[in-house]
Amino acid sequence: MICMPGFIDTHWHLWTSVCRALIQLDDPRRGYFPVTNALGQHYTPEDSYRSVRLGLSEALSAGATTVQNWAHNIRSPAHADAELRAMRDMGVRGRLAYGTPQGMADDEPMDLKGLERIQRQWMPNDGMLTLGICSRNVGDTTNPLRGNISAEIARIDWGGARALGLPITMHTSGPSPVKLLERAKLLGPDVQLVHPLLTTAEERRIMHERGVSYSTSPTGESRRPASAGVIQFGEMLQAGVKMSLSMDNTSSYAADYFQCMRILYNLHQHRIGSRILLTGRRLVQLATLDGAADLGLADRTGSLTPGKRADLILIRTGDINIAPMSDPYTALVSFAQPRNIDTVVADGRILRLGGAFTALDYASVLNDAAECVAGLSTRAKWT
């Protein structure tokens, strides 16, 4: 087997996991954003719990041991409690990025009192869970279903998070807001941006100087039209911007970090080739240690290093899609699939063994998810 660190996901909307039952690939009216926005406004805390638990079940099956839960539908402090409880119950390491609810007015600041209560009551814990915020887009009206705030509202939201010592993450899937954020003096090493698609060389220089990091989600980003930009992974590396890997969601496609690395490599070779060298070893580092560094956890996880916590996976190399194996990095990037993952260990606890969950009642997870979808559909009047 290959023994390696568990995958570290730095941007995943776990609350949308149950919505996969209603999303259709070829119908824009039933696409990811219309469905999740419509249903999201009817979530109860129990819906949040069940959806996060479903998503994390798939995360473990895919070999993820750490996840930044990008929770941009915290409708109340009880919803935040529910998402944290699901993360704790599933046994993963991770960060809750506390966000604003779907449908919230753009001129209304986020619930900073609720954020402070969550920090006071949940942090510190046993070291498995940390806290941050996910911000609405700043100065971009590309996607009104997800919220677009002014720099003035961002100063309130981000200032409240910084007063609590919490990091910030934000989407940049529309026109790049980097210069706007720089003029507003909002950028810093506590900021992670998501979807590196439309930045300029000057903006990449600014991000490098300010210590800003970027999370890329190749599976989802590769589905976007050409007008949305290209995945600028090579350009980010060349500029010295810190990078990490993420799934984004599993309501539109399955969790597969091997595929993420493959797509990223293929698109890089197609666009840039050997001009900026990208190796299998570098891609595996992106999916593990770089993610730990992005989340401030590199002293605890991300590599098989004495003194770190035991977050690791074992991958069978005798399976038909891998064997016979030579270079392990080539095997991981070119051939491996989630079904090859035999064992998943998080913080020394064996959560999957022989390709099966060791304690999780998966039938219960599926039943709860189905009930959740039925209830949400009824309340949202979604047919």
Image (tube, rainbow, N blue to C red):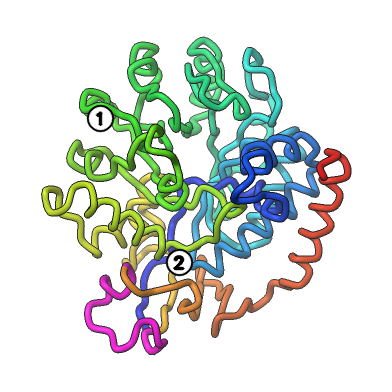
188 lies above or below 183: below
Q: Which residues are magenta?
A: 317-333
Give how far across and how far down residue 368 sits, in percent. 80, 61
Is residue 119 visible to us here? no
Q: Quadrant of residue 236?
A: top left
- The residue at which mark 2 appears reads as 311
Residue 320 inside the magenta-drawn segment:
yes
Q: Amino acid at mark 2?
A: Asp
Give how far across and how far down residue 343 sits, in percent. 50, 78
Is residue 96 visible to us here? yes
Residue sitting farthest toward the left? 275
Q: Quadrant of residue 124?
A: top right
Disc on res. 204 = 1
Give how far across and how far down residue 22 sits, in percent. 72, 51
Disc on res. 283 = none
Q: Nearer the viewer, residue 300 or 84?
A: 84
Nearer-N-terminus badge (2/1)? 1
Q: Amino acid at mark 1?
A: Arg
CA neighbours of label 1 inside 10 A, class few (<14), some (14 to 19), many (20+): many
Report helix, strand or loop for mark 2.
loop
Q: Name the magenta segment's main secondary structure.
A: loop
Task: Check whether the beta carbons of the residues at disc 2 and disc 1 lie within 8 A of each other.
Answer: no
Residue displayed at 53% across by 56% down: 93
Report helix, strand or loop for mark 1.
helix
